[in-house]
Image (cartoon, helix red, strand yellow):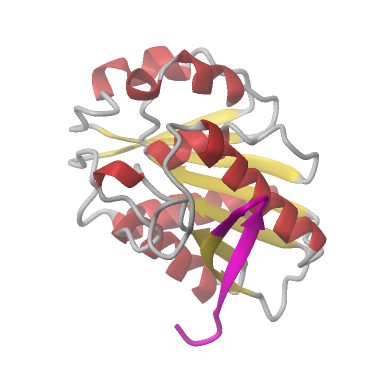
Amino acid sequence: MVGTEKIFIINENIKLEAEYYPSKTVEDSAIIICHPHPQFGGSMWNSVVAGLFNKFIKEDISCLRFNFRAVGESSGEHSSGRGELSDVKACVDFLINEKKIEKIFICGYSYGAAMGCSAVNYSEKIVGFAAISFPWDFVGLKYKKLSQSDKPKLFLQGDRDDIARYDKFKTHYDTYQNPKEYRVINGADHFHRGHEEEIAFEVFNFFKSLI
């Protein structure tokens, strides 16, 4: 993709395949985008992830998408969350230490929401998160606890989602403290096909309100 850099981010003995777009005009802010479950075909090339990445490039905001360990050209083995959470933290460290980013926003989709949003309190430079189809009932209580924060939070949920179940969404959402917002994506199931632009629009507008 024009204007992006293919890079590898080091997390101890793991190399994470990533693509980074450096803004030409906004030097201090960036978004990290985390993809769905690796063992169900999730990768940084997922259509929702790509829609977000392309939207932020269009708006000239620095953005980083990456493959969790054992996905694509990333090394290592899938570790059911523990290692994947550290992969997100390695990306945060990369933006802070290598790119001198001062404000980091995390956006995760499905499994990526559980991993990415659970890193929200890792650094004071993380300003908030957006969670798309957070699969609370699939990943367990641990990631609901880790993603609790007093930082701004946006949740997006499809009203036909039977994986991150729509009928349980409000119950889970209500356990989070303010500030928080949510958007229901009408007609969307867990895969959000055909709703990629709508999701990217909502996430970008929320990001813009924080920066």
Seen from the viewer's position, the closer of residues 84 and 198 is: 84
For image coordinates 72% across by 36% down, the residue present is 122
Q: Residue 86 placed where, x, y %?
A: 61, 40
Quarter of the rendering occupied by the N terminus: bottom left
In this rendering, would 30 be left or right of 136? right
Q: Residue 118 placed where, x, y %?
A: 58, 31
Magenta segment, principal secondary structure?
strand
For image coordinates 25% across by 18% down, the residue present is 167
Seen from the viewer's position, the closer of residues 10 and 44 is: 10
The image shows residue 91, relative to residue 36, as above or below, that is below
Q: Is residue 13 magenta?
A: yes
Quarter occupied by residue 198: bottom left
For image coordinates 54% across by 59% down, the residue present is 16
The image shows residue 146, relative to residue 99, as above or below, that is above
Which segment did they paint magenta? 1-15
Q: Residue 145 placed where, x, y %?
A: 57, 17
The image shows residue 102, relative to residue 174, as above or below, that is below
Quarter of the rendering occupied by the C terminus: bottom right
Quarter occupied by residue 85: top right
Seen from the viewer's position, the closer of residues 182 and 30 is: 30
Q: Residue 157 placed where, x, y %?
A: 33, 34
Quarter occupied by residue 138: top left
> How many numbered circles does the render carry?
0
Which residue extends farthest bottom?
2
For image coordinates 72% across by 44% down, the residue present is 126
In this rendering, would 148 be left or right of 66? right
Q: Is residue 108 magenta?
A: no
